[in-house]
Amino acid sequence: DPTAVLLCVFDGHGTCGTAVSLQVLQSIYYELDQRCEPGALQADPAATLTHAFEAVQGQLWACAAEEVIRIDARDSGACAVVAYLRQKTLWVAGAGDCTAVLGVKGESGTEALLMSTDHKVELPAEKARIEANGGYVRPALYQDGELYAPARFFADRQNPRLGPGLAISRSIGDLDAERVGLIPTPEVRRHDVTAADSFLILASDGVWEFITPQRAVDMVATFFDQGKRAFDAAKLLIAHAAMEWRANEGNYRDDITAIVIWLPEITKALESRGSPPP
């Protein structure tokens, strides 16, 4: 569809996280481009994106059942956020803790508008599903008033070594965790883009660990307001995230991925592609 663009961030975790995230990237695109019915994505983006996430999970199960396992997603997975922009309508599908944020012009400057949910295990609905499947959610641990360890869920309260020990309740992969409530099903949000919407940020949790959505929007807005490239704004955001990891965690840091697009620029281009020739 020349009037649409698809943007994806996948953040792998676990022993085979890199391989799983690459497989998910390829499979999501294949599902949307080749496997779904012609026109399905345009007709019902929310249902089609949801089906794609769940279909890729099915493919990973098939891989795990092979005699020679190509992609082992039993204890590895990928958090995902996928944005589908068709002319001036935006859909965002998310599973896990990759996050999408809009920069929206307001009276006091550019404001952050979250377009996705971080599926942390302590969220009431997520916790309830895990417990209904026999899992146990260990509460977050604090030391001297500061977070020491995030909430995680386990198959056996008495034996946490049995895993899965994940802090997120949704992802693609993590097959062994499905039996205790993990699901690949994304939450999908729709947003009609207006003149107030300046840009969209998609990023892995390595960006958001020490940078709030509003702070990220403030950084990117400076580039937008000065007419600079979205690519350079993304590079700045990644650099700041890396510096925060260095300051807070020394030599350790999580994976850091970010995509930034200027919405007025891209929606104008997409609309022009859909206009009939003069």
Image (tube, rainbow, N blue to C red):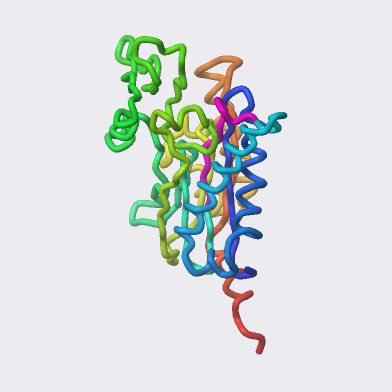
Q: Which residues, given as a range, are shown in magenta? A: 72-82
Choose between 205 and 26: the one closer to the eye: 26
Specify whether residue 268 is painted magenta: no
Residue 66 point in image, percent of width and height: 67, 33
Residue 95 point in image, percent of width and height: 46, 41
Seen in the image, is 132 located left or right of residue 185?
left
The reply to whether residue 52 is in sight is yes
Choose between 178 and 4: the one closer to the eye: 178
Of all residues shown, which one is farthest toward the front? 67
Q: Tell me the quarter of the picture where residue 140 sits.
A: top left
Residue occupying image coordinates x 44% and y 37%? 170
Residue occupying image coordinates x 46% and y 33%? 211
Image quadrant occupied by the N terminus: bottom right
Residue occupying image coordinates x 51% and y 42%? 219
The reply to whether residue 236 is in sight is no
Image quadrant occupied by the C terminus: bottom right
Residue 243 point in image, percent of width and height: 57, 26
Rendered view: 111 above or below 238 = below
Choose between 213 and 132: the one closer to the eye: 132
Residue occupying image coordinates x 35% and y 10%? 158
Of all residues shown, which one is farthest toward the bottom? 278
